[in-house]
Image (cartoon, grey):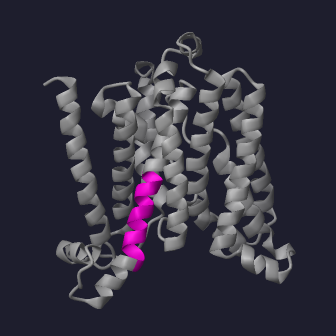
Amino acid sequence: MNNQKRNTVLFSLLFTGLIVLFFVNISLGSITIPFKEVYTSLTGGQSSKSTWEYIIINYRLPKAITAVLVGMGLSISGLLMQTLFRNPLAGPYVLGLSSGASLGVAFVILGASILPSFLSGFLLSPYGIVLASTLGSTTVLLLVLLVSQRLRDTMAILIVGLMFGSFTSAIVGVLTYFSSAEQLQKFTFWSMGNLGNLSWSSIIILSICVLLGLFLSLLSIKPLNALLLGENYAKSMGLNFNKARLIIILATSILAGSITAYAGPIAFIGLAVPHIAKLVFQTSNHTVLFWSTLLFGAAIMLICDVVSQMPGMEVTLPINAITSILGAPVVIWLLVRKRSFK
């Protein structure tokens, strides 16, 4: 079987598996809903139980859509960063966006007690926390973009991103030191990630951001393939390297920043999924890797969400714990075998 036929079969299986997982995700939970009822509700029919239909439309469907958006966005942004920096251990948060978002949320949650009551009431609402997270990640984004225009060395941008992350993490550490147990608990819950608290209006905004980021990523496929052999080779091929780098950084920032704002910092998906796609499809061609990483990210995030729901039980585990359990072995394997990756 040649590569093209093999890829066609793999993509067909992956796409079919993603659709099945989407229905499984909606079906399973503390209350198990039959597949037939899920299909009926999603296609506009009348479910045999009104409570099932209410649960599907108002809770399970938004959470499943969020899982798909988060999985796609973080996986693609991880792929972009690994190729740009030519580092198999780079992830979507290497630019410090997650730390910037965490700093914004930390200021709101941990510093709300010193603000007037009317202002703290708004900031501690879900919309206030999303706004604070967005402002934090956007501030770091603007700083990184500003620095990237002044630095020619791509690795220097990576170091700057890590320094921004360390700086903001240090400020968060100071804020947590002076915070109450209740404030620390709320901040900890946010940092564990959550896919289930989004309203339909929030999902629409997140969808627009993710689709914009994916569109910019799609435009970067040819530059990414050129970058596989290094910056000098890409420039010799006529690539406008500074423009390509700016678009890649902007795409990653939009994806990682918006997802962190709405779902919290989700670990390991952006780091592990691109390598899973490379291992399965056995290629470095980003035309194939883009779509395979996209589908794998959505599928794996749905699986993680199913596991976190603990089907048949009232307990819901933090989504970050599940993604870490899945991702950590992959990262360890990469550390041992990283020489085999380009």
Q: Nearer the viewer, residue 45 or 276?
A: 45
Q: Nearer the viewer, residue 304 or 185?
A: 304
In the rendered view of the protein, which quadrant contains the C terminus? top left
Residue 237 image offset from top left, x and y in percent: 52, 12
* Residue 91, placed above or below residue 86: below
Is residue 93 at all visible to an observer of this figure?
no
Disc count in the image? 0
The quarter of the displayed image where residue 314 is located: bottom left
Q: Is residue 192 shown left or right of residue 323?
A: right
Q: Main secondary structure of the magenta part?
A: helix
Q: Position of residue 127 (x, y in %)?
A: 65, 72
Visible residue check, residue 299? yes
Q: Which residues are magenta?
A: 58-71
Q: Quadrant of the N terminus?
A: top left
Q: Is residue 60 magenta?
A: yes
210 vs 4, left or right, is right
Give the residue displayed 25% in from the left and 40% down from the top.
Answer: 11
- The residue under the point 86% across, 74% down is 114
Whether the magenta-drawn stretch holds residue 98 is answered as no
